[in-house]
Image (cartoon, coloured by chain):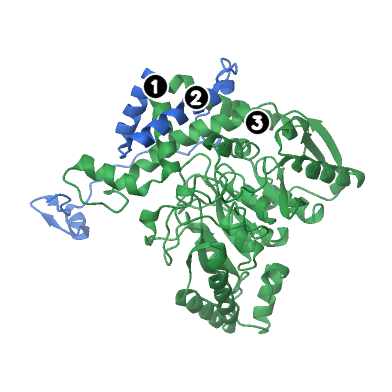
Amino acid sequence: MELRKTSVRQAVEAVYNRELTAHKLIEQTLKNCSILNETMNIFTHIAGIDALEQAKAVDRKIENGAQLPLAGVPVAVKDDICYGVLPTSFGSAAFKEFISPYTATAVEKLMDAGAIVVGKTNLDDMSQGSTTLSSPFGPTLNPWLAERAAGSAGAAALATGVCMLSLESDNGGALRQGASDCGVIGLRPTAGRISNYGLNTFTSSFGQVGISAFSSENISCAFEIISGFDERDASTAVCRDRSTEKHAVADIEKIKIGYPVNAFDYLEPGLREVYEKTRDEYAARGFMFEEIDLTLLREALQAYYIISAAEASSNHARFDGIRFGKAGKATDLEELYCKTRGVTLGREARRRSVFGTFLLSKGNYDCYYRQALKVWNMVREEFAAAFGRYDIIVLPAVKSLPRPLDEEKEFIEDWADDLYCAPVSLAGLPSLCLPVGRVGQLPVGMQLIGPPFSDEFLVEICNRVFR
Amino acid sequence: MADLQLELEKAIRVIKIEVSSSEQEELHKELNNFLLWLEPMLDLDTKDTAQVLFRHDAFNVWRKDRVKQGELAELQEAAPNFAGGFYLVPRIFE
């Protein structure tokens, strides 16, 4: 079975019709994972006997008449999301063999539905980045052009056909930029639609579990299962009646699409043409694109980096060798802290911890941090005003093409690549990234952004319009 | 610049990481560039804007505190080690 050409529904049907067993499907998938990982470096850990045992258990449940909507579906899980069977490194070499004592809610829900975790996917240093280039385990190669970075290893796993769903995290845009770089679909849901319980995020305000897949139909299938209130995550939204969340998309040609022209000025050559061509094609089909101004993108990005660095400095404080982290030999407490944190935090995590502590210190707090909190509010209001006039807004997902593996970039240039994604994280809005074209061999993705709780609406639009 | 250097050193002390002198030099340069990069955001007029307090515009529903006396015996039973009215925890430093 070629996973890229098969929908989740078809795969589950095949398992139920006994065309193949869940065990056979997972056995073959694990072989493919191992072969690909040697060259692509997609996984930090690949499942073994446990996954095969789980697949056997799924086969037994099916024989006993159980209805499992994801029976035997192979899933990849980003390595900052806890899974009690395989190690969870959080993107730190110090945690390479750490096995979490519990499993994240989103993973549990997928497994309860019959999905099988085939591996944990690579990530940047403490999940801080959108390239995998700062990973302590080496970068993941882009499946379309091996001398470039993949952006997200989960997206690379989908693009190479070694899983059907990828559970990921998104802070300033890793999920969406990865989806763009690898030519798959990625959904960062409204803040609180999917439980973050079991996600180790460096920025508590913006970290969000999301899902990527090769088709919007697969996204829809998984989102239905993993979204919802979780009593273990107080920030999850209580949705009393799911039917009220679904916007009517009866007359889809009548949706109004906001197109922020000013935003497209920052793009690397070649990318602008892709987005303009997409707009023109859909405008020719009768969709209403209207030019709008989003005036705060650059400032939103800067506010994001202030707030997220401040939160990183606080969140990283627990890796001290006593609460978390492998304690090194030390003669006193101070030395223990320094030694442990020296090996736990990589270069990017150290940079953000230092900057965050600096920004929160007396004398800098009001000037930087408080100002960023106010800009955060302005960004929310600007998006809210735009959604008074438009059903969705489109924005590029990336400012530049995937990075060459050997290219050294100034860290600020690297951060500036989040220009189109970080403001959406700041506003807590749902954003679906879908492939819309190519520059050379490399795919390019575009974000469909909707008002809060319009997640299903975005998937539906993707399914019906931008298929 | 000298002030920035002092503040940087303070931040490094606060977060307790070992930093080589070359890394510290690099961090100083990076912090300086970062602060320059932030200037457009600092120029925004925000005097009439409230700061965000919560990730969501939603409020928790509070219940009244219910104070009840815990059972010491139950707690002792749940503890791995307990002696003389104290919990015993592993020694970190010898």
Label 1 with label 3: CB-CB less than 8 Å: no
Q: Which residue is mark 2?
A: B35
User: A219 and A440: which one is in front?
Assistant: A440
Question: Could you tell me which secondary element the residue under label 1 belongs to?
Answer: helix
Residue A437 can be seen in this image? yes
User: A171 and A9: which one is in front?
Assistant: A171
Question: Percent x, y for residue B35?
Answer: 49, 24
User: Which residue is depicted at the point 29% across and 54% down?
Assistant: A326
Q: Which residue is mark 3?
A: A297
User: Which residue is depicted at the point 47% across and 74% down?
Assistant: A48
**Figure chain in green:** A
Alpha carbon of mark 2 to alpha carbon of mark 1: how far?
10 Å
Label 2 with label 1: CB-CB less than 8 Å: yes
Q: Disc 1 marks which amino acid?
A: Leu
Mark 2, chain letter? B
Q: Which residue is mark 1?
A: B4
Q: Quadrant of residue B21?
A: top left
**Figure chain in blue:** B
